[in-house]
Amino acid sequence: MTESQPGGAAGKLWGGRFSRPTDALVDELNASIGFDRRLYRQDIMGSIAHVRMLARQGIIPKDDAAKIEQGLRQIYDEIRRGEHEFRLADEDIHLSVERRLREIIGPAAGRLHTGRSRNDQVALDFRLWTREALIRIAAGLTDTIGALLEIAERHPDAIMPGYTHVQRAQPVLLAHHMLAYVEMLFRDLDRLRDAYRRVNLSPLGAGALAGVTYPIDRQFVADLLGFDGVCANSLDAVSDRDFVVDLLSACAQIMLHLSRLAEEIILWSSSEFGFIELDDAFATGSSIMPQKKNPDVAELIRGKTGRVYGHLMGMLTVGKGLPLAYNKDLQEDKEGAFDTVDTVLLILRVLPPMLRTTRFRTDRMLTAAGEGFTLATDVADHLVRQGLPFREAHEIVGRVVAYCVEQGKDLPDLTPEEWGRFSPLLVESPPPLTPADAIAAREMLGGTGARHVADARIAAAAARDEWVRWVDGRAEALAAVSRRLGLEDTDDGPEGGPGDRDPR
């Protein structure tokens, strides 16, 4: 049996019902203060909004509400300065703040928890944190899209081989390739916006599970905190963590896309491809091989994708068997989300400058685009335009390729006599044999033709501008909430926002 804390459960804010102290190991297992301290800003924001509502509704005296709000601001400042003592005995950030509030203002602090439970309180805090995380991630995505568009604009005519099965397939424009990732990230932004819409509802007022008996005004609190509305069902409000799954799922999809890009950066920077040269600031060396320049940033993006996937699966597993309403299992919803957001935000800070400083060897790309029979389909299409059915044309060009392999030649090396062995049409009308020919032939909506790619880049830039406006608008709305509550709002420092580490 481990040593238990003296004084029974009287030291706990919930200890009235208990006659014996909790075991010390139970305290260690039960406590979440080691990680949910990151929610201190959201917890204090929610408490200020709650206490203003209590006073407005006449549920608590206005002078006590004023003392509570002043005390909460003092605690906020103390935590930001690193002066607040986080104690294991406090269990969580909610009780840590309330304990310190009691030390500052005395018994009036006991009125703060009127009309709410830690169940709806933590759901509120986590929703506030999650919506901030979604906006920060969206901002990182718009920056990454901007970097990809800059590459496309810088190299509008650069031709590279397109691949299937990691084998050269057909020539494409480098800009077209970059715009493919832009499309992926636009879909990611759509998912983040959908997640924001679902998370931006206030659960406060649901109480432990059944609502509360006081004449509270849930909509007033929701408006004060910048929510679009309130959660409609109290049981669901305290037990729903769909918004966490939304966040983790969106991040997993983002990482899938960034990992694909990272894999190509790794391949392209190798001597086997030689398509790009990474800036020294975004590569590392070897402790034994002096010649090495390793794409570690891209490798870490690829590697950390599995980490993010793991957190998604962990949250799905936590939630799969929970009966209504709140269960302690839901304490496991935060650490994976915190780590996921930290990981994604760090990657979205390092990836754009890495892309912007990468040197593309467009001459090497062009050479590779014309090798490996990448024009074979264009030759077949040329025969089709001369009147042959495609399957017959496909068969003819397949035999041409087999002949070239046997003779150690590529398509441009063949003489008219050699072309004539397979079809007189290939002598009467010579086929297209350069990567530029292949690009010019694909002027179609969504294709790699230069004109359509240029139009697509312009449209993507305009779409990105719209997303930037949405992100900026949401960020300003969240900053306005902090200002309404009298709390300083900054992007840096230990305030416990998404991407910030634990305040110490």
Image: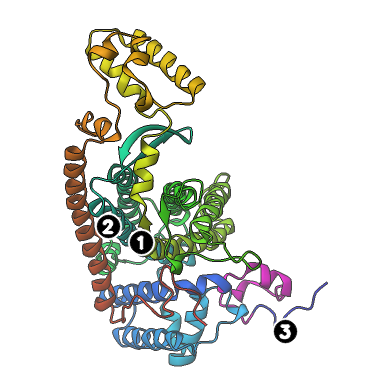
Quarter assignment of residue 81:
bottom left
Q: Which residues are magenta?
A: 10-33
- Out of 35 and 281, give the one closest to the viewer: 281
The residue that label 3 is drawn on is 6
Residue type at mark 2 is Gly
- Does 25 lie within the magenta span? yes
Distance in Å between CA atoms under marks 1 and 3: 55 Å
- Classed neighbour count for the residue bearing mark 1: other residues with Cα under 10 Å, few (<14), some (14–19), many (≥20): some
Marks 2/3: CA distance?
A: 59 Å
**Which color mode does the image show?**
rainbow
Which mark, residue 146?
2
Q: Is residue 7 above or below residue 350?
A: below
> Residue 282: x, y in percent?
45, 65
Look at the picture and state if 167 lies above or below 151.
above
Residue 145, quarter of picture? bottom left
Dot 2 or dot 1: first in sequence order is: 2
Residue 463: x percent and y percent? Answer: 20, 50
Q: Which residue is mark 1?
A: 352
Q: Is residue 91 left or right of residue 497?
A: right
The residue lying toward the viewer, choosing from 122 and 116, is 122
Q: Secondary structure at mark 3?
A: loop
Front-lying residue, 23 or 178? 178
